[in-house]
Amino acid sequence: MTPLDLVESSTEEVLADPTMEYLDDLPDDVEMSLFDHLEELRQRIFYSLIALVVGAVGCFLFVKPLVQLLEAPARGVKFLQLAPGEFFFVSLKVAGYSGLLVAIPVILYQIIQFILPGLTRRERQLILPIVAGSTVLFLAGLVFAYLLLIPAAVNFFMNYGEDVVEQLWSIDRYFEFVLLLLLSTGLAFQVPVIQILLGFFGIVSARQMLSAWRYVLLGSAVLGAVLTPSTDPITQTLLAGAVVGLYFGGIAMVALLGNSEGWGKLIGALGSPLTKVDAIAQAQSDTVTASANIIEEEISQNCDSSLEDLSQIELENQTSQVEDTDIENQTQIEEEQTIQLEET
């Protein structure tokens, strides 16, 4: 079989594979020592920190518009600077949180690049939907907190003491409350992502998730109380209700997609063209490498055989030359003896 036939055969095998077992292969299976992994981890962390610093510095240049944007939900409230430099440190906090939000794509990229060599093709196809879904949910959590949770909490506290105290708030305390509420809400909105991962790996099924709804209600209430920096019941109820809704939405997604086998079929169907191209290229590369090794072995064997033939021919020539020399010497000796006899 020629190398071209081997390449065509490997391509046909990949295209004819109905179970797509090649999805369980490791495309970048490279052995690395522990120190190599630690060195790569150090580099990834370093790049992430650089992105965070650059994002924070960039946001600090536009910190006043960001501060005004975060002050918008608290209409009718006057903010005071109760200590020297308080607004400066508030600006640093706002720039830091905003820089983290800006640097998240780079940080996610570094994390993905670090874990990518250990993932199969099937698992790699899950990265893009998970990252995209997590990003959308995090942004949805920020919007939910900004449009609903923060105004609800601010209005509750303003109306509660409206007839008793004047609304003069510390700018540091207010921004600590707002930033923590935004971050905690964005993290709480990651519940469906965790559920989908558990369903994909077959750890928990949709039926098991649904059977634990009582514990989820209790846990969401506790989560709302812990994650919200305020103590008002409105904010806690809104966040707990959002978490419960997201949880049942995650159950619906897991039930729709089924177990890990169903996930694999769906992801394989969505990503099969690119995956098959990748698998075909890998199979052809492996086949070409194997063919090259076969050709190299054949050439080596032919060279060895040719060298043996040349050595044999050279040996025969040397033997023939020695025999000719012996014959000439013998003839010369006989001629000399004949001459001596004639002279005698």
Image: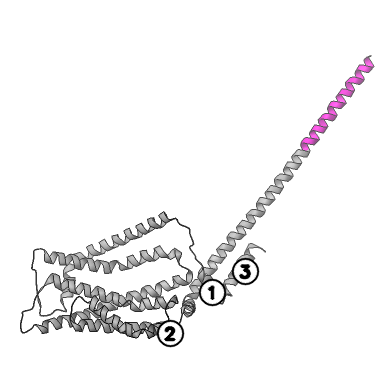
Q: Residue at x 14, y 71 (%)?
A: 173
Residue corresponding to mark 2: 256
Residue type at tag 2: Leu
First reached walking from the N terminus: tag 1 or tag 2: 1
First reached walking from the N terminus: tag 1 or tag 3: 3
Image position, residue 175 (x, y; %): 17, 72
Image position, residue 305 (x, y; %): 71, 48
Crowd band around label 2 with a 10 angstrom C-alpha radius: few (<14), some (14–19), many (20+): few
Between the C-alphas of marks 2 and 3, the distance is: 37 Å
Q: Is residue 1 above or below residue 77?
A: above
Crowd band around label 1 with a 10 angstrom C-alpha radius: few (<14), some (14–19), many (20+): some
Residue 269 left/right relative to 307: left
Residue 289 belongs to the span the image colors magenta:
no
Residue type at tag 3: Ser
Residue 337 belongs to the span the image colors magenta:
yes
| Marks 1 & 2, CB-CB < 8 Å contact | no
Q: The magenta stretch spans which residues? A: 317-344
Quadrant for the N terminus in the image = bottom right
Task: Tell me the SS state at disc 1.
Answer: loop
Q: Residue at x 23, y 84 (%)?
A: 237
Residue corresponding to mark 3: 9
Q: What secondary structure predominates along the stretch shown in magenta?
A: helix
Q: Residue at x 13, y 81 (%)?
A: 157
Relative to the observer, which residue lies in front, 274 or 206?
206
Quadrant for the C terminus in the image = top right
Relative to the observer, which residue lies in front, 108 or 302?
108
Image position, residue 108 (x, y; %): 35, 67
Residue corresponding to mark 1: 20
First reached walking from the N terminus: tag 2 or tag 3: 3
Residue 12 left/right relative to 180: right
